[in-house]
Image (tube, helix red, strand yellow):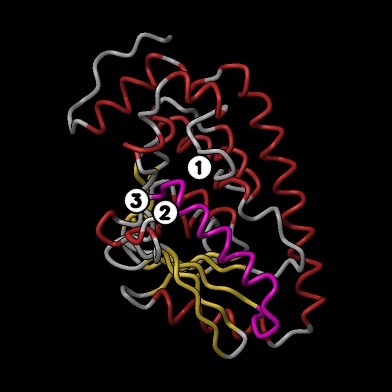
């Protein structure tokens, strides 16, 4: 592993609460293949850590997680996309992070700043704390990748019409809107999201562990079933091979507005 890629994710544990921190602040914690690998390792470590009962997932710097590392994950050649079956590297699909547990311990997302691709990590977490003023965007819609999985996650959280709107428009929305829609469990004062998340984690940790884990496993099983059904419906489109996706990704990398989309 390249020495520059050694500490993209940090792990610590105290008082039965593990803290998993995205540590790529210079890139606003953008997710690369290596970040997903390290996140997977951290989740596995938490799952098997006898000292940890609850985890808090957060990001260092100005943003929780800005989005995918576009230059690495979305500017691959057509041949690479076809071999991988999508924009994500082999074995580094962020959608799999919450589904491979053994002990099924709860994870609390503590988010702040800006949340792009991190929206998936947020919605899949068992509980969500967001700092006031946090801005979210479902970037897959304007990027041409489609929002089927995110639509399913919104519906799973009973976001109803709000989730439909976000999935179809891809517009920015705030933590306050998400809290009003019932998506977020706690709205924290600015810069206090970690403190509020820790208070919530300690409340969970007071309970018998197996009681909590049974609920987590049940919750994630139904969540995964719904998201996989939604992705199955969208899979035939292979949107990652379309001209519209390629133009949107190039435009983002080149910091310009995309040209007119062609529907192909």
Residue under circle 3?
66
Q: Quadrant of residue 95?
A: top right
Contact (Cβ within 8 Å) of mark 2 with mark 1:
yes
Please say if the residues under marks 1 and 3 sit with CB atoms less than 8 Å apart: no
**What residue is pinned by disc 2?**
177
Up/down of 86 relative to 125, above or below: above
Q: Secondary structure at mark 1?
A: helix
Q: Position of residue 259 (x, y in %)?
A: 24, 16
Which tag, 1 or 3, sits closer to the chain's start? Answer: 3
For numbered disc 3, what is the local secondary structure?
loop
Which residue is rendered at x = 45% and y = 71% of the image? 10
Q: Residue at x 36, y 8 (%)?
A: 262
Q: Secondary structure at mark 2?
A: helix
**Label placed on residue 162:** 1
Nearer the observer: mark 2 or 3; the answer is 3
Q: Which residues are magenta?
A: 31-53
Using the rendered view, name the quadrant where residue 64 is placed.
bottom left
Q: Residues within 10 Å of mark 3 (few under 14, many from 20)?
A: many
């Amino acid at each position: 592993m390249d020495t520059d890629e050694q500490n993209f994710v940090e792990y610590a544990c105290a008082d039965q609460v593990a803290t998993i921190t995205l540590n790529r602040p210079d890139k606003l914690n953008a997710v690369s293949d290596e970040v997903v690998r390290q996140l997977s390792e951290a989740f596995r470590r938490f799952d098997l850590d006898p000292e940890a009962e609850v985890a808090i997932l957060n990001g260092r710097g100005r943003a929780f997680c800005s989005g995918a590392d576009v230059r690495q994950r979305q500017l691959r050649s057509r041949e690479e996309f076809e071999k991988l079956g999508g924009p994500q590297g082999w074995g580094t699909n962020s959608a799999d992070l919450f589904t491979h547990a053994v002990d099924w311990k709860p994870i609390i997302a503590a988010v702040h700043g800006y949340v792009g691709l991190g929206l998936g990590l947020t919605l899949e977490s068992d509980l969500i704390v967001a700092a006031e003023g946090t801005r979210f965007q479902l970037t897959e819609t304007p990027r041409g990748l489609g929002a089927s999985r995110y639509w399913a996650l919104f519906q799973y959280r009973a976001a109803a019409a709000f989730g439909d709107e976000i999935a179809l428009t891809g517009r920015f929305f705030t933590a306050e809107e998400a809290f009003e829609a019932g998506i977020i469990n706690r709205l924290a004062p600015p810069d206090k999201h970690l403190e509020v998340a820790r208070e919530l984690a300690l409340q969970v940790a007071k309970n018998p562990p197996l009681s909590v884990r049974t609920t987590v496993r049940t919750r994630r099983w139904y969540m995964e079933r719904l998201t996989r059904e939604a992705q199955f419906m969208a899979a035939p489109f292979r949107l990652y091979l379309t001209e519209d996706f390629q133009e949107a990704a190039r435009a983002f990398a080149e910091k310009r507005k995309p040209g007119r989309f062609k529907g192909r």
